[in-house]
Image (tube, rainbow, N blue to C red):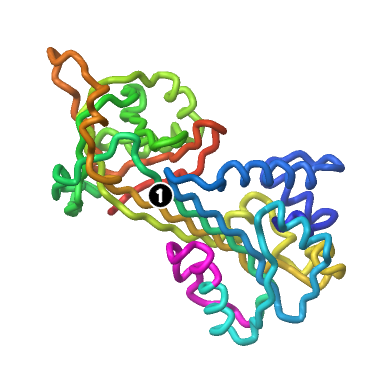
Amino acid sequence: MISAGAKCQTQREILEGLCFNTSSNAESNVRRGHKLLLQMLTQANADHVLSIVNALFAEKNTTFLETFLKALKDYQAEAILTDFHKPAEAKNQINSYVEKKTKGMVKHLLDSVDPQTDAVALNTFYFKGKWKDAFDKRRTHNADFHVDNKTVVRVPMMTRDGIYRMANIREVGCTLVAVPYVGHFSAFFIIPNPGRLQDVLEALKNDSIRQWFEEMKPIRIILSIPKLQMSSTFDLKKELTALGIKLVFSDKADLSGITGFKNLKLSKAVHKALVRMDEGGTEAAASSAGENTPTSLPPQAVVADRPFMFYIKDNQDDVDLFVGILIKP
């Protein structure tokens, strides 16, 4: 979004840091690609809720170029003026904007605002889907979740007997299970064996999960996963700086494509993600009717009762919407 108004080395740092090419048409190509992606992801659907909010808040005396405002539409984004010299009012304005845009799902995005702020870029992401085969609420029960060798907490554990695609990755020490949503989304749970969490995290750095997906096969299991709601807020300034995106946050920033002048820098970039996982309604008889399997072999029990990773993927477009790790519910 900011690259649409960045120029020269400031724009190159953004594109290179995010691994896009830096050809003469790079920014416009990136923008077209994101426009199509956002249109596909956010189209109205009764099966799930996917809310993506992008916005740029700038000091009240800022005058935006029409070309920049037009470019923001490709990111389904808005540019909004606020008075950062009144930090409490600015914070409330930004938080109220996000809460309204997400229909109350994402609240309190910012805890505070620095009165010296020039501009704040924000992104929020909320997803709630319906399981293709819902968990029966009557089977949800309190169970132990082992945070570590010394810490145990009680969690509501959802349980279901059914056929799921899964794989046991013995060389790393983890189990991978795919739980489909209605439509073309799936949640992939990566459950490390006791003591193997760091081994799994190291393997994921090498993108090993792509190979693991290929090893998955349908099998009848008794799956137990915690009912949960997770939210995480990230100050992207630290993360982006580590990727080499530095100028945009400095007094040397060239964001003249936003205002026409080199008098603006990005003070803060904030990302918040919210995921909810629950039973998804009462399991209907029809949900399990198509899962008849030979009963000579007892189903394997797969229990996410210790820290685990999860991916939520759009299978149709091969997009990872969320990548998360649950350490302590």
User: Where the C terminus falls, by quadrant?
Assistant: bottom left
The reply, left or right, for residue 294 in relation to residue 6 is left
Q: Position of residue 167 (x, y in %)?
A: 34, 23
Q: Position of residue 200 (x, y in %)?
A: 38, 34
Q: Which residue is mark 1?
A: 128
Query: What's the residue at 69%, 76% (across, down)?
Result: 81
Residue at the location (23% across, 25% down)?
Answer: 289
Q: Nearer the viewer, residue 158 or 113?
A: 158
Magenta portion: prevailing SS class:
loop
For residue 26, which quarter of the picture? top right
* Residue at position x 44%, y 58% in the image: 232
102 magenta-colored: yes
Query: Please, which residue is most extreme toward the bottom here?
Result: 86
Which secondary structure lies at badge 1? strand
Crowding near the residue tagged with mark 1, few <14, some 14–19, many ≥20 C-alpha atoms within 10 Å: some
Residue at left offset 67%, top offset 45% = 34
Where, quadrant-wise, is the N terminus in this rendering? Answer: bottom right
Query: Image height check: is 277 above or below 67?
Result: above
**In the displayed structure, does residue 320 sit left or right of residue 38?**
left
In the rendered structure, the answer to whether residue 96 lies left or right of residue 247 reads left
x%, y% of residue 116? 66, 80
Where on the picture, by quarter, is residue 32?
A: top right
Can you give x and y, in whole percent of width and height, for residue 314 in the image?
A: 50, 36
Q: Is residue 108 shown above or below 134?
A: below
Total marks in image: 1
Looking at this view, is 111 or 294 the one in front?
Answer: 294
Q: Quadrant of residue 310?
A: top left
- Vertical position of residue 112 compared to residue 197: above or below: below
Q: Is residue 163 magenta?
A: no
The amino acid sitting under disc 1 is Lys
Magenta segment = 97-115
